[in-house]
Image (cartoon, helix red, strand yellow):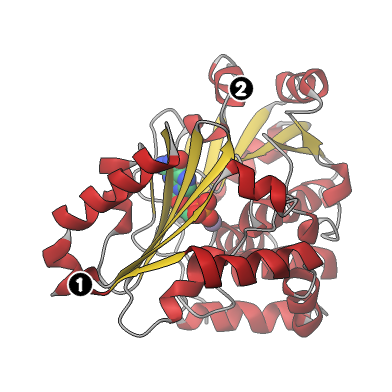
Amino acid sequence: MLDRLIDASKIEAIEQIIDKGERFAILVHRNPDGDAVGSATALALFLRARGKSATVIVPNAFPVFLAWLPSADETIVYETARDEAVAAIGAADALFCLDFNALSRLGELGEVVASLAAPRVLIDHHLQPDEGFAVEVSYPAACSTAELVFRIIYRMNNEALTHDIAECIYTGMMTDTGSFAYASNSKDIYIIISCLIAAGIDKDLIYRRVFYNYSPNRMKLLGYMMYDKLRVYPAFNAALLTLTYKEMRRFCVAKGDTEGLVNMPLQIKGVRFVCFLREEVPGKINVSLRSVDDFPCNSVAAEYFSGGGHKNASGGEVYGTMEYAVERFRTALSKYKQQLTE
Ligand code: 5GP
Ligand code: MN
């Protein structure tokens, strides 16, 4: 019933790498999200069930609303445990690279990975992956990396899906599709969900664990952002949110507190493009972009914010002041006016 999305040769190549090796490291992008952590923990659990050693390494910490994921507490955070992370990567027979398309998305950790000879297996759904992977499972048509991990596990052994693996996979699929509100029209997604439910997950509970888990600060921040910080540009069908370092401190913003804010202005009638500028450290502005339909926010990310990503969800960064970042955004609006308003 499931379409055979991934080439059989790639499944075989991965199976050979798994069979040949003993230790594996699983790496995901900086600022790991639900798909990064969900797909990585799912793969780690699968490898361990096959009698292998598998370590998940994240460049920096993930949000607390993902801490409940099965085996997430065994993850090594490179930023706070560099030696341990480097040792685990160095000892690996192969490295699984999940939910990113270029080693630069690992931050500093990318240089460590690039210097190693161990084969790298890419499992990802972003466009235009870097070269240098021994096996490349890159399918932008997949809703999430977790969907691809499901497909790999299912094809290798359709009885390997445990309750815990299913919880991890569902979390990745749910978070990368805005709870199946976008990038989720493929029938296969719902066939996969039915397999996950058959494996015993409580999808309503997973939803609550992830989304009904915010701090009071986050709710105050949300009110402040929508009331005071939202700027709508009706002539461009666009909206902007900004959050300075000072404001981050004022609202005691913790990891995950800003998650999802960028999507909210898309609820405004007519808005097709949203930019969220967040000064995470003084002088460095993190950029999140979202769009609907055909507007390619990844082009804006690449052209104006040294970034990239998916057509409807992308990001990047700006070094400089908030004023400068806003100026970049306004310039982008002028340049893309026609595409935004057609
Ligand atoms: P978010 O806004 O959730 O941080 O990122 C949304 C998406 O944008 C990510 O899934 C990723 O595909 C892409 N993205 C975010 N930041 C960057 C970046 O600095 N470079 C590239 N190439 N893509 C990014
Ligand atoms: Mn993803």
Q: Is residue 195 left or right of residue 3?
A: right
Q: What secondary structure is found at the residue carrying circle 2?
A: loop
Q: Residue at x 61, y 77 (%)?
A: 192
Question: At which x and y percent is residue 236?
Answer: 22, 68
Quadrant location of residue 302? Answer: top left
Q: Residue at x 22, y 57 (%)?
A: 333
Question: At which x and y percent is residue 86?
Answer: 74, 20
Q: Residue at x 76, y 62 (%)?
A: 217
The residue singled out by tag 2 in the image is 118
Distance CA(mark 2)–CA(mark 1): 52 Å
Q: Residue at x 62, y 50 (%)?
A: 247
Q: What secondary structure is found at the residue carrying circle 1?
A: helix
Looking at this view, is 100 or 155 the one in front?
100
Question: At which x and y percent is residue 79?
Answer: 73, 28
Disc with the residue nearer the chain's start (2 vs 1): 2
Amino acid tagged 2: Ala
The residue singled out by tag 1 in the image is 235
From what the image shows, is residue 135 above or below residue 300? above
Quadrant location of residue 290? Answer: bottom left
Instruction: Determine if residue 307 is in view.
Output: no
Image quarter where ligand 2 lies: bottom right
